[in-house]
Image (spheres, rainbow, N blue to C red):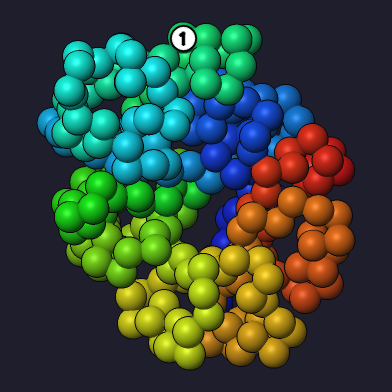
Amino acid sequence: MQHPWPYPRWIAHRGAGKLAPENTLAAFRLGHQFGWRMYECDVKLSADGVPFLLHDATLTRTTNAATALPAGASPTAGDHPFATLAQLDAGSWHSAAYAGEPLPTLANIARYCQAAGALVNLEIKPTPGQEALTGHTVATQAALLWQGHTPPLLSSFEPTALTSAQAAAPALPRGLLIDTWRSTALQEAQALGCVALICKHTLWTSELVAHAQALGLRTLSYTANTEQDAQRLVALGTDGIISDSVDKLGPEG
């Protein structure tokens, strides 16, 4: 039997795909302007335990840390307190229009989503070595921040993070992410108490979708960016499509 599923089919990757700086409130706002009502984002911990949005283990690609931090400072995001991270520019790397865009906290995202009537998939993206702590903290904070609202879907490639999240907030729905098919994936998702399996979109076949759904699992895909890929996933009967193409697919596409 499948669990209740309050989420729409279309999920904007990192807020607005590649059209705005990923994992920022600016990206969420742009996704909203295109009609999307659910967003995927990546959450990790600062050195002082604040959940915030960032995909990479390091700050180098999507912030100005290389020039803003003191010479010789660690590029690893989890090595810095949030007071330091909050001063970084997470927008200029994308384009001048977003200069000065800050790294948002999980609390910032919760406030925005609730005000906008939007839902969210929080990918737990631990700094290596912090899988259990990150899973526990993100789940605990998410349960508090979304109390009284449709809960976020928690997901991770890291089973340890999902196990820790389950222990901290068992009522929050969870999904196992995989990028390469393994024969144990469905059983792993069930053992972790997940409600969804989230696969690289090319992995889904009609047989696999049917098998997963027969086991009560929802079937989600990332990152499907063409009309052809999206149509194939719709035809297969999958439950969710994570996409960068917020201007071409989904609610307005």
Residue 131 in view here: yes
Picture coordinates of residue 134, whole percent (x, y):
23, 49
Q: Residue at x 64, y 75 (%)?
A: 203
Above or below, 11 relative to 198: above
So how many labels did they put on this image?
1
Which residue occupies the foreground of this view, 229 or 190? 229
Q: Residue at 67% x, 76% y: name it.
A: 204
Q: Residues within 10 Å of mark 1 (few under 14, many from 20)?
A: some
In the image: residue 231, left or right of residue 134: right
Check disc 1 and report its element: helix, strand or loop. Answer: loop
State the residue lying farthest toward the left.
48
Residue 146 visible in the displayed image:
no
Q: Is residue 227 above or below residue 204?
A: above
Q: Which x, y percent locates residue 71?
A: 20, 16
Q: Position of residue 175 (x, y in %)?
A: 45, 65
Q: Residue at 58% of width from left, 35% of height from top?
A: 15
Pointer 1: what residue?
100
Quadrant of the image containing the C terminus: top right
**Residue 161 sits above or below residue 144 on the image:** below
Given the image, on which type of amino acid does mark 1 rest? Gly
Image quarter (top left, top right, bottom left or bottom right) of the N terminus? bottom right
The percent coordinates of residue 4 (x first, y second) are 54, 66
Q: Residue at x 58, y 22 (%)?
A: 94
